[in-house]
Amino acid sequence: MEVNDSHNEVRIEHVIALNQHAKRLFPALYSIHKRLATEEYQFLYNKEKKDKKNAVVMTEEQAEEIGCLLRLPIAILFHFMNFQGKAHSLLLDCVNHSKQLDFTGNYIFSKPVAELFTNYVKLHIFLTQFDDLQLVISFYKQSLEITKKSESQGLKYLSEFLQERETLKPVEAELQFMSEHLASFFRSVGPSILPLLNEASLYDWSKITI
């Protein structure tokens, strides 16, 4: 099922695929949230000897060990950035079509979109519960420079993305824009939103006050 014009296309299959991606991201982020709090990862937060460039001094052996420990958290953060970018783009496509389309009663299309909207917000909120993720990126970047003698451009983009989203202000602005354009859409799917927000998850969302 799809909605399109000459310039845009919204396929329900894309929405469903992103929701499946989100379902995998929730436990993945939860696992690294717990992992980064263990003793094994306390080197991230300890005061280490630094050089003149304010970089942590580590041997090649230490760099290999640190790189191994941080490889999974970094990979999951890249998946998070990828999901948020695609979800945001798709939600904007829905915004662009919302004026022309009547979603009332179109449960097959509206429920997955409402679920994607919910997942997008929840994952962003979850991200703000992490301690300084810039430390994770910084240590991993240094380990790569020492062991691989190279630098990953992707880490720069990830660092900038996460830095922009350390607070809820960016998503608040996005939601304000979307809510104004999707008002009629969410009025038509209101009954489906509450169950989605109350779905059981691995994280205790009651701890968070928005």
Image (cartoon, rainbow, N blue to C red):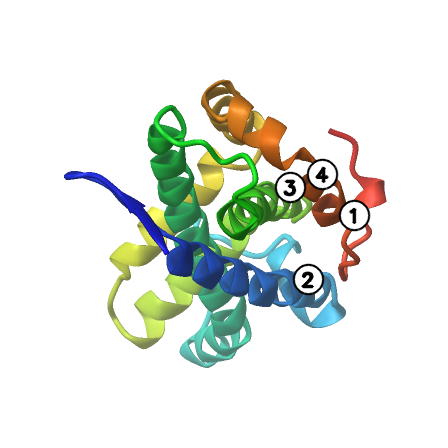
Residue located beneath label 2 in the image = 30
The three-letter code of the residue at mark 4 reads: Pro
Q: CA distance from mark 1 to mark 4?
A: 12 Å
Task: Check residue 191 in the rendering and tell me which mark sits there, or answer none.
Answer: 4
Which quadrant is the C terminus positioned in? top right
Mark 4 / mark 3, whichever is N-terminal: 3
Q: What separation in Å lies between label 4 and label 3 (alpha carbons)?
A: 23 Å
Q: Tell me which corner region of the image, top left, top right, bottom left or bottom right, holds residue 152.
A: bottom left
Q: Nearer the viewer, mark 1 or mark 4?
A: 4
* Residue 57 visible to an observer of this rendering: no
For label 4, the SS is: helix
Quadrant of the image containing the N terminus: bottom left
- Percent x, y of residue 34: 73, 64
Q: Which residue is mark 1?
A: 198
Few, some or many residues within 10 Å of mark 2 (<14, 14–19, 20+): some
- Expressed as whole percent of the image width and height from the top left, the position of residue 188 reads 60, 32
- Identity of the residue drawn at 40% across and 29% down: 98
- Label 4 neighbour load within 10 Å: few <14, some 14-19, many 20+: few
Is 65 situated above or below 201? below
Pointers 2 and 4 in contact (C-beta within 8 Å) = no
Return the residue nearer the eye: 209 or 189. 189
* Residue receiving disc 3: 125
Contact check, label 1 and label 4, Cβ < 8 Å = no
Of the residues shown, which amino acid type is indicated by label 3?
Ile
Helix, strand or loop for disc 2: helix
Q: Nearer the viewer, mark 4 or mark 3?
A: 4
**Looking at the image, can residue 152 be seen?**
yes
Of callouts 3 and 1, which one flags the residue occurring earlier in the amino acid sequence?
3
Estimate the x, y position of residue 85 in percent, counting from the top left.
38, 46
Dot 2 or dot 4: first in sequence order is: 2
Q: Secondary structure at mark 1?
A: loop
Tell me the CA gap for discs 2 and 1: 18 Å
